[in-house]
Structures are given as structure tokens and as C-alpha cells.
Amino acid sequence: MKPADQKDESPVYQRVVLKNASPYHYMKVCLVLENESTRLSAVELKQFIITGLKSLYGEVGAALNFDVLKYDADTLTAFLRVYSRGLVKLWSSLTLLGSYQNQACAFRVLQVSPFLLALTGNSRELQLD
Amino acid sequence: MRPRLVSDVSSVGRYLLCEVIVSDRSRLLLLDDRAIAIAVKATVARIHGDYGAALCSVGFSVKYLNAHTGIVFLRMPKRCYKLLWSALPFITSIETRGEKIQCFLNCLHVGGTIRTCQKFLIRYNTQQLHRMLPKCKNEEEKQQVSQALLNCTLVGGTDEAFEDELRSEEDEEECLPNMP
């Protein structure tokens, strides 16, 4: 019999693969406008994205639930959350959204991840001092 | 029919058998297949946006319309028929010859070919006639309905023969003159 305090030394490896791990997908997007001094509120931004969904995917698309979790009005950067099944629709309608109140605009998608924690760091914007 | 190739992905289709239901049956006669196609495309564009309108423009068509009974065959590509099907309940009116006819589309059957839809339609009409038989008001109508029931077979495959059958089944209800 093994003494109770003797640990089993051989390493045990276990590989866990998660498919569809998270029900939501999180996106960090930035709106770039022709006239750089234009400001939008969070509500206006959400309404603008909904009009984009509506033009590309109709009433069904406009009914897609997504949330604006955080919004920085100075840099026009927002964190969006959408159900994983709606990610393709949301992303494609952001891509094709071209004009806001008669001025040219573009949505820059900076980060997409199924985990919110992953959006805190970005190796592109990493500052090494 | 030319043999279907493996690469012929979009030539496969789904045929939706729908019934146009209006409150006033005489308005049904104003319908034509172009009006129905326009109504369906407009509704799909409203419900599914540019994406739906693009899907509709390629494989969708109205294959057959019977203005007397309101039966219409819609042909859709196999890969997106469910999306287009989901927009059909949102059709509230069809505009034709300057008039708006309030109606809705009732989907009766989905088939892979027109022939299966035809077979279903024969069976469906037979069931409808069976249901109408007890409600007949006089002996003459009963005779007509029984005769139509006995005549219900799938004929050779020409459109005229098919039309003739549908017309004879509806005769006892509408008393329309026989058209050549």
C-alpha cells in the first residue's frame, strides 16, 4: 500500500477543446467619418447600426439583438456584443455601411472575440517601453 | 429534359404550392403571374433586405397560376427556399391592373418537382370535393361533384389537361362557362 502522503509523480495531460464556447461574440469597432469633428451619442450609434442591418438584411436583420457595451464618444470606439449566430450578419452590415447623414463613413473592426477578456489586450497597439 | 450534371447545383429547386386566399372570389380573376412575382419580390426585399432581394432575383419564378382556383406554383432554388418561404406570410396585398387586392398566401405543399406538386394538388382537390359533397344543396350538384371525384386522375402531363381537371372540379361551386 502506498503511504498516504506520497504523491503520484507521473504527469497527466488533458486536452479540452471547446466548440462554440461562448454564446456571444464581442467586437471592438471604431467609426471613421469624413468630417472628423462629428460626434455621435451611444443611442445614435446603435440606431445607425440598425439602419445598416435593415438595408442589408431587412426587417429580420433589424430585429437582430446586439448591445453596445461601452462607447467612447471622443474616439467613436464601441464594444459591441452579439449572439454568435448573428455575428456574420452584424459584421457584414458594418462592412457595407457607407454613409452617415450624407457624409462618407467606415467602420473599422479592430477586434473580434468570443471572450470579452480577449478584447482588453491587442498586440498591434501594444506599447513596449 | 437534359440530364442533370453534378455541377448543376442551382438547377435543383423547390416548388412551393400556394393558395391565394381573398375574401371576394371574383377579384381572384384579375391576378396574373407577373403581379404575384412582383408582390413576392417586394415582400422579400422588405423582410430580408438587399440579401433577400438578391436571392430572389436569381432562381425565383412563378411557374403556374390558376386564377379560378387561386393556386400558384412558386419555384425557388434549393439552397435558400426556406428564407424566401419565411417571407410569404408577410404578403398582405397584391397589386394588379391598378387595383390592390387584399389577400394572403397559404402554403399547401413543398415538392422537389412540379409533378409531385401536381399529384398532391389532385389529392388535395379530391379531399376538398369530399368535404363539399355533404354540403351540396341539390341532386344535380351532387351528381357533378361525384362525377368530378371519379374523374380525378393524373393525366399525361400537358397543362391543358391539368387545367381542365381543376376547372371541372370548381364548376359546381362557381358555375363558370366551359372555356376552350
Image (cartoon, coloured by chain):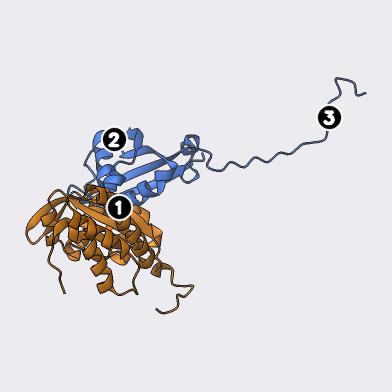
**x then y, percent, for residue A19:** 56, 43
Is A39 above or below relative to A34? above
Q: Is residue A53 visible?
A: yes
Closer-to-camera residue (A85/B138): B138
**x then y, percent, for residue B86:** 32, 50
- The quadrant the C terminus of chain B occupies is bottom left
* Residue indicated by mark 1: B130
Can you tell which of label 2 and label 1 is closer to the viewer? Answer: 1
Can you tell which of label 1 and label 3 is closer to the viewer? Answer: 1
- The quadrant the N terminus of chain B occupies is bottom left
Query: Residue at 19% of width from left, 54% of height from top?
Result: B139
Closer-to-camera residue (A21/A123): A21
Chain seen in blue: A
Secondary structure under the numbered disc 1 in the rendered image: helix
Is B166 above or below relative to A5? below
Indicate the chain on which mark 2 is placed. A
The label on residue A73 is 2
> How dense is the environment of label 3, judged by Cα within 10 Å: few (below 14), some, or many (20 and up)?
few
Secondary structure under the numbered disc 3 in the rendered image: loop
Question: Which of the marked residues, 2 or 3, is nearer the chain's N terminus?
Answer: 3
Query: Residue at 27% of width from left, 54% of height from top?
Result: B129
In the rendered image of the structure, the colour used to display chain B is orange
Indicate the chain on which mark 3 is placed. A
Asked if both marks, 1 and 3, belong to the same chain, the answer given is no
Query: Residue at 12% of width from left, 66% of height from top?
Result: B177
